[in-house]
Image (cartoon, rainbow, N blue to C red):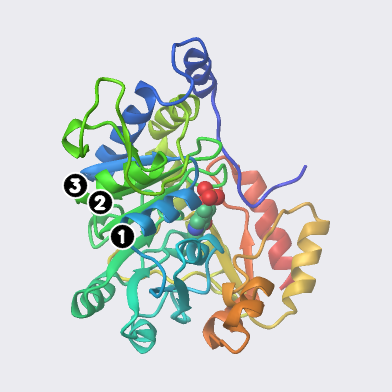
């Protein structure tokens, strides 16, 4: 028996949905793409959604739609997957890392303020583990300095902030449907927005910068006519993937509820232990628990980690602070320090967290962690 840190939950009806699409007229862009976009948008109460090939592509097109380019600075968290910062580099812009709050592990609004320069164009807050960032404070800063906010909500599908679902709060919100995330399409991503102009630009960048929409064309030579108006990409998602996504969306509430149960059981098991710091619960927020991350306070993190792996528990560490990656060090970030991010990184372990984790499996994880701390 091997217990991974995360994995998908696929039922027979998910498989049937994919098979039906394989028998249909459309393998790629067909009716399933819009149906999937609609199902996620309706769930979140969002106006517009654009589905793309993965979460990283979603971040990239969001930056492009926001007009981020050469000379711009984009502030994000160091405790995230590299894609949250790489998307700025793809556009020729410069990622700037603002340190995290040591309790929530999310980007600290005061640190954002300290990093603002006349070149700052956007903030990409990351809802680490599914815990919403301090969005009111971040929006206040964005308003003051006229910045765009693109939420990286790849961990936070189903989370809510002060009674509102993550997905409608900012200019754009990005999701991923990688198999370890709340729902999966194999590979897939989506951008939510309330802004029609951004919606049109997102669609343009998704497909080579090409439009066929009569109202957008500069001229029209005939029914075959289309125009490439900007430099876009092929970031399309397939109908096959979206059929899986539509089927998975029906289970999202159950998946999130199960993740919350698992988190509560871990909290119960470790909350009183001196050697472990369990995740912090921010006021008014409802985490959707993509990850369950503990800090190992007294013991050597690597020894605990290695022992858990030896016992067939697929623990992981999220994340190595992005500015310390060799690529970033070699490209101007060698002197950057984010003390809070670097400290928690040295103590973090991500425990198994996925809807299909059984109580017996979780009991085994708890027992083994307790025996090592
Ligand atoms: C998963 C993830 C991404 C990228 O998503 P992909 O679909 O794997 O490209 C971006 N940011 C964060 C925080 C993620 O967890």
The furthest residue to the right: 310
Q: Quadrant of the C terminus?
A: bottom right
Q: Are marks 1 and 2 in contact (CB under 8 Å)?
A: yes
Residue that carries the numbered disc 3 in the rendered image: 196
Q: Residue 66 got which mark?
A: 1
* Crowd class of label 2 (few under 14; some 14 to 19; many from 20; radius 10 Å): many
For image coordinates 37% across by 29% down, the residue present is 33
Query: Position of 30 compared to 345: left or right?
Result: left
Which sits in the foreground, 336 or 223? 223
Query: Taking 339 as reference, is 200 above or below it?
Result: above
Q: Earlier in the sequence, mark 1 or mark 2?
A: 1
**Callout 2: SS:** helix
Residue that carries the numbered disc 2 in the rendered image: 198
Residue 159 in the image: x percent, y percent?
Answer: 35, 54
Q: Are marks 2 and 3 in contact (CB under 8 Å)?
A: yes
Residue 279 in the image: x percent, y percent?
Answer: 49, 69
For image coordinates 51% across by 20% down, the residue present is 18
Looking at the image, can residue 168 be seen?
Answer: yes
Residue 72 in the image: x percent, y percent?
Answer: 38, 74
**Mark 3 beta carbon near ligand 1 (under 8 Å):** no
Q: Residue 36 got which mark?
A: none
Structural distance between the alpha carbons of marks 2 and 3: 5 Å
| Location of residue 122 (image quadrant) | bottom left
**Callout 3: SS:** helix
* Crowd class of label 3 (few under 14; some 14 to 19; many from 20; radius 10 Å): few
Q: Are marks 3 and 1 in contact (CB under 8 Å)?
A: no
Structural distance between the alpha carbons of marks 3 and 1: 13 Å
Query: Taking 225 as reference, is 142 above or below it?
Result: below
Which sits in the foreground, 295 or 137? 137
For image coordinates 49% across by 20% down, the residue present is 27
**Mark 2 beta carbon near ligand 1 (under 8 Å):** no
Q: Quadrant of the N terminus?
A: top right
């Amino acid at each position: 028996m091997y217990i991974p840190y995360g994995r998908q939950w696929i039922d027979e009806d998910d498989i049937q949905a994919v098979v039906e699409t394989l028998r249909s007229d459309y393998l790629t862009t067909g009716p399933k793409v819009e149906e999937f976009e609609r199902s996620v948008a309706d769930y979140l109460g969002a106006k517009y959604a654009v589905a793309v090939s993965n979460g990283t592509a979603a971040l990239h097109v969001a930056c492009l739609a926001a007009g981020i380019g050469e000379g711009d600075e984009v502030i994000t968290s160091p405790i995230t997957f590299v894609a949250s910062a790489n998307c700025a580099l793809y556009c020729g812009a410069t990622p700037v890392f603002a340190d995290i709050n040591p309790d929530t592990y999310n980007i600290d609004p005061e640190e954002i303020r300290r990093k603002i320069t006349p070149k700052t164009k956007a903030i990409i807050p990351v809802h680490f583990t599914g815990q919403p960032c301090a969005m009111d404070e971040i929006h206040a800063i964005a308003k003051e300095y006229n910045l765009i906010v693109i939420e990286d909500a790849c961990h936070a599908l189903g989370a809510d902030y002060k009674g509102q679902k993550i997905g409608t709060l900012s200019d754009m919100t990005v999701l991923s449907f990688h198999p370890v995330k709340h729902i999966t399409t194999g590979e897939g991503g989506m951008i939510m927005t309330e802004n029609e102009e951004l919606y049109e630009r997102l669609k343009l960048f998704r497909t080579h910068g090409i439009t066929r929409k009569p109202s957008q064309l500069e001229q029209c030579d005939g029914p075959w006519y289309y125009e490439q108006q900007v430099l876009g990409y092929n970031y399309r998602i397939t109908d096959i993937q979206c059929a899986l996504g539509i089927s998975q969306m029906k289970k999202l509430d159950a998946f999130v509820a199960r993740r919350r149960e698992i988190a509560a059981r871990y909290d119960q098991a470790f909350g009183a232990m001196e050697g472990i710091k369990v995740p912090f619960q921010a006021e008014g927020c409802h985490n959707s628990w993509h990850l369950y991350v503990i800090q190992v306070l007294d013991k050597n993190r690597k020894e605990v980690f290695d022992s858990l792996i030896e016992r067939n528990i697929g623990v992981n560490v999220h994340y190595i602070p992005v500015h310390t990656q060799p690529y970033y060090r070699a490209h101007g970030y060698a002197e950057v320090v984010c003390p809070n991010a670097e400290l928690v990184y040295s103590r973090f372990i991500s425990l198994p967290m996925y809807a299909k984790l059984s109580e017996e499996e979780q009991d085994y994880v708890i027992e083994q962690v307790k025996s090592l701390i």
